[in-house]
Amino acid sequence: MKRRALVAKASVWQRRTVMGMGLATAAMWLAACKPNKLSFNSVDVTGVDYGKGFELSDHNGQVRHLTDFAGKVVVMFFGYTQCPDVCPATMIELAQVKKLLGADGERLQALFVTLDPERDTPDLLKAYMVNFDPMFLALRPTPEQLPVLAKDFKIYYKKVAGKTADSYTMDHSAGSYIFDTKGQLRLFTRYGSGAPVLAADIALLLK
């Protein structure tokens, strides 16, 4: 009887061991099937409920939507052409990022959204973009569109009076938004992150 009890007990342990191994194997397979979470240098804002799109005229007068750039990573920056430092530095950085991406640079679309439509005419914006890359686009909201757009993208901007009516400056947010190839807002990159860091994040989104 004692022997039968030991055999029965051993059999139970064997079944439990086999079952445990089976569960462990299944868990490993499930883990292997789960996509790895991408690790970015920029701030991951995936899933936020703002910055979902726009309808704005570019510097050529063509109405643009985020869906126009499907298949590309879009970097969207808000600034103005008479900005003395942050804006040109950001656009130069984006031009460097495009070069660092090599052949994939053609799948990067930089968008410069003016916060100063009063002075930033389409012709001025077009000339400004050529300084950085002929494929970069400037978007020009109307004075009525601008506050709505800024609210949608949580952008801060404020006119600061100068010595004359036309010499004012604009205080504004200095970061950029990055959309993946499906038009989903994924990242917020702070000003001055550096071209290599930004290029690495964009390369991940292009995979």
Image: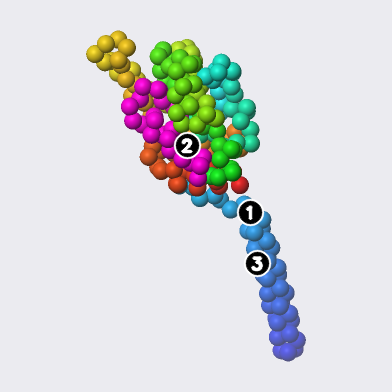
CB-based contact (under 8 Å), mark 2 and mark 1: no
Residue 96 lies in the magenta stretch: yes
Q: CA distance from mark 2 to mark 1?
A: 35 Å
Characterize the magenta stretch by its predominant secondary structure.
helix
Q: Is residue 39 left or right of residue 66?
A: left
Residue to which mark 2 is pinned = 95
Residue 199 lies in the magenta stretch: no
**Residue lying furthest top in this view?**
165
Is disc 1 surrounded by few (<14), some (14 to 19) or many (20+) residues within 10 Å?
few
Q: Earlier in the sequence, mark 2 or mark 1?
A: 1
Identify the element where label 2 is drawn. helix
Q: Residue 122 appears at what percent x and percent y?
A: 49, 16
CB-based contact (under 8 Å), mark 1 and mark 3: no
Residue to which mark 1 is pinned = 34
Identify the element where label 1 is drawn. loop
Q: For the magenta stretch, what is the residue range?
A: 77-100
Q: Is residue 86 visible?
A: yes
Q: Residue 186 appears at what percent x and percent y?
A: 53, 38
Type of amino acid under label 3: Ala
Q: CA distance from mark 2 to mark 3?
A: 49 Å
Q: Earlier in the sequence, mark 2 or mark 3?
A: 3
Identify the element where label 3 is drawn. helix
Q: Residue at x 42, y 20 (%)?
A: 115
- Residue 24, labelled with which disc? 3
- Residue 147, labelled with which disc? none
Type of amino acid under label 1: Lys
Q: Residue at x 43, y 38 (%)?
A: 93
